[in-house]
Image (tube, rainbow, N blue to C red):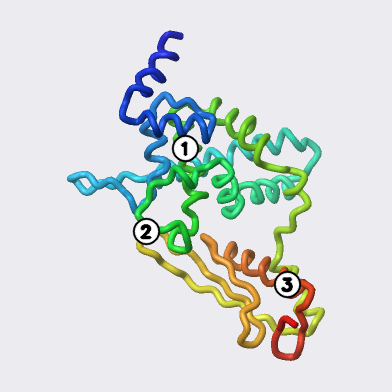
Amino acid sequence: MIQHFINPIKLLISPNKKFYLLIQSHLKITPNHIKFYEIAFLHRSASIVFSDGTLVNNERLEFLGDAILDAVIADYLFKKFPRKKEGFLTQMRSKIVKRSHLDILARNLGIDYLIVSNTSHNANAKYMYGDAFEALIGAIYMDKGFDKTRKYIVNYILKNFVNLNELIEKETDFKSRIIEWGQKNKVILIFESVEEYTQFERAPSFVSHIKISSQIIGEGVGKSKKESEQNASEQAFNNVTAEGFVVNSESVTSK
C-alpha cells in the first residue's frame, strides 16, 4: 500500500513532473513508470539513438498495444453481443480498430498534444496519432499489467469515446457500393493504387485513386491496398451521391 503512494510522489518531484501531470489530465492515468509513456509518444522521426546504433521510439510499444487492443476488443464484443455471429463481431472489431477511427480516438484523448516528432503532423506521418494510441495501450500494459489495461480500454475508452450503436449502422464496404453505383449508371470506374514510402515510415503506405475517365473522384490512404481502396471508395461514393453531381459519359462533374 505504501509503495502505491511512493512512486507517484517520486515522479512528481522528478524532471518529468510536467509530462506526468499531462498524462494524468489528458489520459486519466496515474503512471507508476513514466518512461513507458515517454516512449509511447516518441515518434520514429524523433528516435533516441544509442552508441551501439539501437533506436528507441514507440514502434515496439505500438506492436504490443495493437495485439492487446485486438484481444480486449474481441473479448468485450464477444460478451457484449452473446447472440451475434462471428461475421458481425469481426466487422465491429474492425470498425473500432480501423486506423481512421483510432486517429479520432487519439485526438479526443489529447494524444496529438503529447507526441514528440521531428516531422509535421500531416501526410508525411499519416498514422502518427493512431500509432501513438496503440503505443499508449502497450505502455499501460507494461506499466500496470493486462487486467488494468483491459479495464482502462473498456471503462474509459469504450464508455466515453466509442458509440457502438453508431458504429453498427456505419457502412464499411464502400468499394462494393461504388462498384454497384458504377454498374447502375453504366460508368467505368478505374482503380489505381501505388505504394508510397516516406522517410520516417518503416513500411510503405498505399495511396489509391478512383477515376472516371481522367477525373479523380476519390482518394484514400491506408497501411494496406485494401484499406486505401476502401477509404478512396468512401470518398468517391460520398462525392457521386452528393447533391449537385452529374454523371455523363466521361466523368462526374459538379454543377
Residue at far bottom of view? 249
Image location (x, y in percent) of residue 91: 70, 51
Number of numbered labels in the structure image = 3
Answer with mark 1 or mark 2, whichever residue precedes in sequence: 1
173 relative position to 224: left or right:
right
Q: Residue 178 carries which label?
A: 3
- Between disc 1 and disc 2, the foreground one is 2
- Between the residue at mark 3 and the residue at mark 2, the CA separation in whole angstroms equals 33 Å
Q: In which quarter of the image is the C terminus?
A: bottom right
Task: Look at the numbered discs 1 and 3 and tell me whether their residues touch, using CB distance below 8 Å.
Answer: no
Q: Is mark 2 on a helix, strand or loop?
A: loop
Please name the amino acid that badge 1 sits on. Answer: Gly
**Residue occupying the point 47% across, 70% down:** 195
Disc 2: which residue:
200
- Mark 3: which amino acid? Ile
Q: Residues within 10 Å of mark 2 (few under 14, many from 20)?
A: some
Task: Indicate left or right for 32 with 161 as reference.
Answer: left
Q: Residue 255 carries which label?
A: none
Q: Where is residue 70 in the image (x, y as percent from the top left)?
A: 58, 42
3D distance between C-alphas at marks 1 and 2: 21 Å
Q: Nearer the viewer, residue 80 or 23?
A: 23
219 left or right of 47 in image? right
The residue that mark 1 highlights is 138
Q: Which of 8 and 88 is in front in this view?
A: 8
- Image point 67% across, 42% down: which residue? 162
Callout 3: SS:
helix
Mark nearest the camera among 3 and 2 is: 2
